Image (cartoon, rainbow, N blue to C red):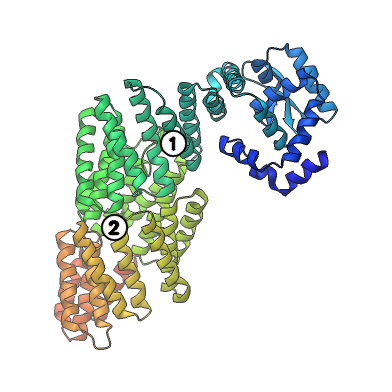
Amino acid sequence: MVHVVEELARGGWQAAVTATAAARQGAAAEVPADLQQLIELQLGQLDLEAQQVLEVASVGGVDFAEASVAAGLPLPLDAIVVCCEGLARRGQFIEDRGLMTWPDGTVSGRYGFRHTLYQEILYRRIGSGRRMRCHRAIGMRLEEAYGAQVSQIAATLAVHFERGCDQRRAMRYRQQAADTALGRYAYEEAIGHLRRGLELLESLPESAERQEQELDLQLALGPALIASKGGAAPEVEQAYARARELCQQVGETPQRFSALLGLWYCHVNRGALPTAREFGEHLFRLAQRVAAPTLLLEGHQALGITSLYQGDYVAARTHCEQGIARIDPTALRAQALSPGPAPGVGCLTMAAHALWCLGYPAQALQRSHEALALAQALAHPYSLVWAKHFAAYLSHRRREIPAVQTQADAVLALATAQGFPNWVGVATFWRGWGLVMQGHAGAGLPQMHQGMAGVAATGMMLGRPRFLVHLAEALGHTGQVEEGLRLLAEALAEFEAGGQGHLLAETYRLQGELLLCRAVPDVPRAEASFWQALTIARSQQAKAWELRAAMSLNSLWQQQGKRAEANELLAPIYGWFTEGFDTADLQEAKALLETFAG
C-alpha cells in the first residue's frame, strides 16, 4: 500500500492535489476507486478513536498540531497525543514533525500526513455538518492562540472560517491576508484574497458596515491590479469606479481621495489627458481642503504628471517641486496601497524630465538620482521599476545610448521578476532601441515591436505616440526613411487626438531630419518642420527642444550658405544655458558655432 501511494506521489499527485475546495473535488474524481477502497480498508483496521483523530486532523491540513485536533474533537488531549504517537510510530498515515509553539505559549506536537492523498480521503469521509463545525472550532482555537499576532495566519484562518460558514470572520481574514501579501508585494496572491473577500461579502446582508468593508477591499484591489495588469486595465477602472460609488453611498470619507486618485491614474495611463486633468484638479482641491501634507503631495504629483504629458513643462516643474517639498519617507512607507509609484518618487522623476525639457540637464540628472535613492530606500518594487525606467528615458534624452540599453536591461529584469507586464513591455522596447542605435537592427527592431505589443495588451495608450516617434527614429537610423515618416505622421495625429504636447516639438524636428534623408531631399518641407518644432518649443519654454530644433535648422542653413543667419539663430539659444555642457546636445551646438564662426 505504501509503495502504491509513493508511486502516485512521484507521478505528480502532490502537485495536482491542492488544499482548495476545487482541487478536492477534482482529486475525488481522479483517485482510482480500487485505491480508495484499499485506503478505506486500512482505515477500517484502526479503532474508532484513531479514525476520528485522523479525520479531524485532516481538517487541520496536511500539517497539523495535536492542539488543533483537540479543538475539534471531544477527547482529552492526552488521548489524542497517545493516538498520534502510536500512528506515527507504526508509520500509519502520519509522521512526527517536531513541536509547534503558538504565541499564547501552547506547545503542541506537530504531525504531517505521509501523503496528501491520505489527508484528502480522510477529509472527504467527514460529513458536511461535522466538517463545518471542526473548521470553525479549529479556527477559533487558532484565533485565540495567536491573539494580536493573528495576521500571521490570516490566510489559514480565512479558509477555516469560510468552510466553517462564518463569513464575516472569513471575509475579515481574507482582507488581512491580502494586506500581508501586499506588504510582501505578492500582488497575485493579494488579488486572489481580495476577490474571494468580495465574493464572501455578497453573502452578507446590505448594511453600512458591508459598504465600508467593500470599499476597503476595492481600494486594496486597485493597486494590486495596477501592478499585475497595468494601470489602464479595465479591471483597474472597475475597482476604483466601484470604490467611488461606495464613497457616495457611505458619505463623506477620506477614502474618496484614494478612489479619485485611482481613476486619475487609470485615465492618465490610457492617454485620456483632459479627463485625467479633471480628476487631478479635483484631487488637488480635496487635498487643499484637508490640508494634509501627504494628500497635497499626491495632488501635486497627479497634476505634475498630467501637465508634463500635456507639454506644460513649467506647470509640471512647479507642481513637482511643491510636491517634493512635502516628501516624508516615513509616511511614504505606509502608502503600499497608493496607485502606482510612491508619490515622492513620481514627483522626483517628473521633475527630472520637466527640468531637462526646460533646459536644466544637470538639475534633471540630480532629481533622477534622488528618485532612484528614494525608491531604493522605500524598498517598493513598483516605485523602483518606475524610477529605473525614467532614468533610462533621461539617458535617452541625453543621447547616452549604451546607458539606455544597460538601464533597460535592469528594468526588464526587475519587472519580469515582479510580474509587472506593462514595464516588461516598456523595458523590452527600450532594450531594442539601444540595440538598433548600436548597429544591431536585426535583433533590436523585433524587440521594439514586441515591447509595443506588450504595452498595448495592458491597455496603456499614453506612451504609444512616443513609442511611434522613437521607433521612427530607429528606422531612420537603419535607412527606412519612408516607414519612419509614416510613423511620425501617425504619432502627430495621436498627439493631437489625445491632447499630448510632450515630445511634440521633437517629433516635428525628427520629421524634418527624415525628409532630408529621402532619396530626393524634401528641403522646403524639412525647413517648415524645423520651424514648427522651434515654434512649439518656444511656446512651451522648452529650451532643450528649442536647442535641438535650432541645431537642425542651423545645419540646413549652413549647407545653403546662410552662415550668418544660422549662427544668429543658434548662438543666443546656446548662450542661454548655464549647465549641462557635458551633454551631447550642448557639445554639438558648441561645435557647430565654432566650426562656422566668422
Please say whether residue 555 is visible from this viewpoint. Answer: yes
* Residue at screen point 39% across, 49% down: 230
Quadrant of residue 407 within the rendered picture? bottom left
* Quadrant in which the C terminus appears: bottom left
Lower position in the chain sequence, tag 2 or tag 1: 1
Residue 472 vertical position relative to residue 301 in the rendered view, above or below: below
Separation (CA) of disc 2 from disc 1: 43 Å
The disc placed on residue 544 is: none
Residue 105: percent from left, percent from top:
65, 16
The disc placed on residue 195 is: 1
Quadrant of residue 204 within the rendered picture? top left
Instruction: Please name the amino acid that badge 1 sits on.
Output: Arg
The one nearer the camera, 533 or 75, is: 75
Residue 384: percent from left, percent from top:
44, 48
* Residue at screen point 69% across, 47% down: 12
Judged from the image, the secondary structure of the residue bearing numbered disc 1 is helix
* Residue at screen point 26% across, 35% down: 296
The answer to whether marks 2 and 1 mark residues whose Cβ atoms lie closer than 8 Å is no
The one nearer the camera, 416 or 312, is: 416
Residue 372: percent from left, percent from top:
42, 48
Is residue 305 rendered to the left or right of residue 407?
A: left
* Quadrant in which the N terminus appears: top right
The one nearer the camera, 255 or 504, is: 255
Residue named by callout 2: 356
